Image: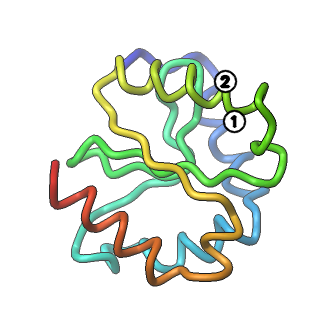
Amino acid sequence: MALQKPGSSERARQLRKSDTQAERRLWEAIRDRRLAGYKFVRQLPVGPYFADFACRECKLIIELDGATHGTDEAAHHDERRSALLGEQGYRVIRFFNEDIYRNLEDACGTIVAALDKR
């Protein structure tokens, strides 16, 4: 993993305090090893980015995207971001916030399947 920038711990703390409703909902489902015994952290600094959720053991990052991620420009940015995270050894899976609101159970199943593949 890349070295953390100075102040990244403080920035991660700020991001955790200002999480979205979808992030809070998913966090309740995956925290404290609730999801198949896997440990997750929130707002993990990786290079210049902060991963919404990460399982360090399996090198898996989960990103939640809001409505603003539906544009071509945002999709291109997300692709670059995922590529950089991949260079750091992480796999990235993405969900729209609506996926978490409408079917959290399926989202969790997708996460477990990705974790089990390693």
Q: CA distance from mark 1 to mark 2?
A: 24 Å
Find numbered disc 1 in the image and state the secondary structure of the residue it sits on. Answer: helix
Seen from this angle, which residue lies furthest front?
72
In the displayed structure, does residue 79 sit left or right of residue 105? Answer: right
Q: Tell me: residue 82, above or below residue 35.
A: above
Residue 4, horizontal then vertical, whole percent: 49, 20
Residue 76, horizontal then vertical, whole percent: 67, 24
| Numbered disc total | 2
Query: Tags 1 and 2 in contact by the CB under 8 Å rule?
Result: no
Q: Tell me: residue 63, above or below residue 17.
A: above
In this view, the residue in front, 29 or 97, is 97
Residue 47, horizontal then vertical, whole percent: 50, 19
* Residue 76 image label: 2
Q: Amino acid at mark 1?
A: Arg
Which residue is the site of mark 1? 11
Q: Tell me: residue 94, above or below residue 81.
A: below
N-term-proximal mark, 1 vs 2: 1
